Amino acid sequence: MKIVQIGTGGWGKNHTRVLSELGVLVAVCDADSQKSKEYGEKYSVNHYESLDELLSSEEFDGAFVVTPTSTHTEIAKKLLEAKKHVFVEKPMTYKSEDGEKLVKLAEKNKVILTCGYIERFNPAVDVVKKIVKEKKFGDLVMLEFHRENRMPMHIKDVGIIYDTSVHDIDTANWLFDDMPNVVFARAGRIKHEHEDFASIMLGYKNDKVAIISSNWITPKRVRKFNAVCTDAIISSDFITQEIIVEKSENSETIQNEKQEPLLLEIQSFLGAIEGKNELIVTSQQAVNVTKIAEAALLSSQKGIPIYLDLK
Ligand SMILES: NC(=O)c1ccc[n+]([C@@H]2O[C@H](COP(=O)([O-])OP(=O)(O)OC[C@H]3O[C@@H](n4cnc5c(N)ncnc54)[C@H](O)[C@@H]3O)[C@@H](O)[C@H]2O)c1
């Protein structure tokens, strides 16, 4: 298995480390020559400043695209056209119509296309997903997410909905095993070029709801969620991966082995290429998340609910 990585910035340096540890990294590419050289030398792999150069020089099976959102479509398209398996960081594309085109291209060229919705690989989410599926504490009725962080000043191309809320949109769809039929949102801007706080309500069938609250205003890092079930409330922290179940008579903590979600995510993509496991995040699910993010922005701008009919 030979893997290349495009984009070795703030987040991409983690993929480079994991891919190198797994022994599959053969080349890196970053438009910033200093970064490509730094990581090429650090992990003893070839390094390039342009994707075209990499494509004409390297033989490989799959690629990780960890560049800013606005560049995803162009880079992923070239890789898919070259019949490579592609992992694109979230959100898959800025416009959902571009995402739809990538899905079709991947199908046509019979390669895997997936997107970095990493919380699916968070052991805490995995445990809650199993509890919900088995109906251990009854039916899942409501989800609440809180994701707060200092403003990431290097992100220029998107606001908090595309950058941050998309994680919770995807996790809500995953836990409900459904797509929302209505989106209502309020978002605003205090310091960033785009919106830096947002509250999003996603409506699913049978009146089930996910409430997503994201902001880049607070100085601390918060990433938590509650799953309200008919017989208990499950609270979890994406960072500590702790899970607490509160029932009317008592509360219990579910012990869980803490693991690095990125490692599990990358192993899952590599396993899917080799046919060892199913692809967890399908490209259509990733397009749907972008559609929901688009609807949230539109809802906030117009002050109305946006109704959706997603695949
Ligand atoms: N899954 C997660 O939890 C998570 C966390 C952070 C970021 N991300 C995603 O990762 C992506 C990158 O974010 P980041 O914070 O690392 O950004 P960053 O700006 O720190 O790094 C991006 C890198 O891409 C390079 N680059 C830009 N255009 C390029 C091109 N055309 N070809 C090659 N290299 C190019 C830049 O030089 C830079 O080094 C974004 O899509 C972001 O949403 C995901």
Image: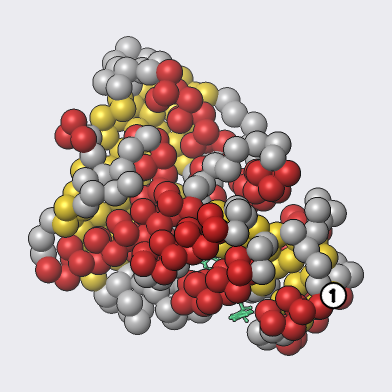
Choose top left, top right, bottom left or bottom right for residue 142.
top left
Classify 17 as above or below 29. above
Classify 47 as above or below 169. below
> x, y percentage for residue 170?
41, 48
Which one is in front, 151 or 22? 22
Classify 253 as above or below 223. above
> x, y percentage for residue 193?
35, 82
* Residue 15 seen in this snapshot: no
Which one is in front, 238 or 80? 80
Locate ligand 1 by image quadrant. bottom right
Number of on-image labels: 1
Residue shown at 48% from the left, 25% from the top: 130
* Some atom of ligand 1 lies within 8 Å of the CB belonging to the residue at label 1: no
> x, y percentage for residue 272?
66, 44
What's the amino acid at mark 1? Asn
Residue shown at 32% from the left, 12% from the top: 249
Residue shown at 44% from the left, 65% from the top: 101
> x, y percentage for residue 255?
57, 25
Residue shown at 43% from the left, 18% from the top: 134
Residue under label 1, please give it: 46
Could you tell me which secondary element the residue under label 1 belongs to? strand
Residue density around tag 1, few if under 14, some if 14–19, many if 20 or more, within 10 Å: some
Classify 167 as above or below 142. below
Q: Which residue sits furthest bottom?
A: 33
Q: Is residue 110 left or right of 29 when viewed as pictured?
A: left
Choose top left, top right, bottom left or bottom right for residue 296.
bottom left
Choose top left, top right, bottom left or bottom right for residue 19.
bottom right
Which one is in front, 166 or 177? 177
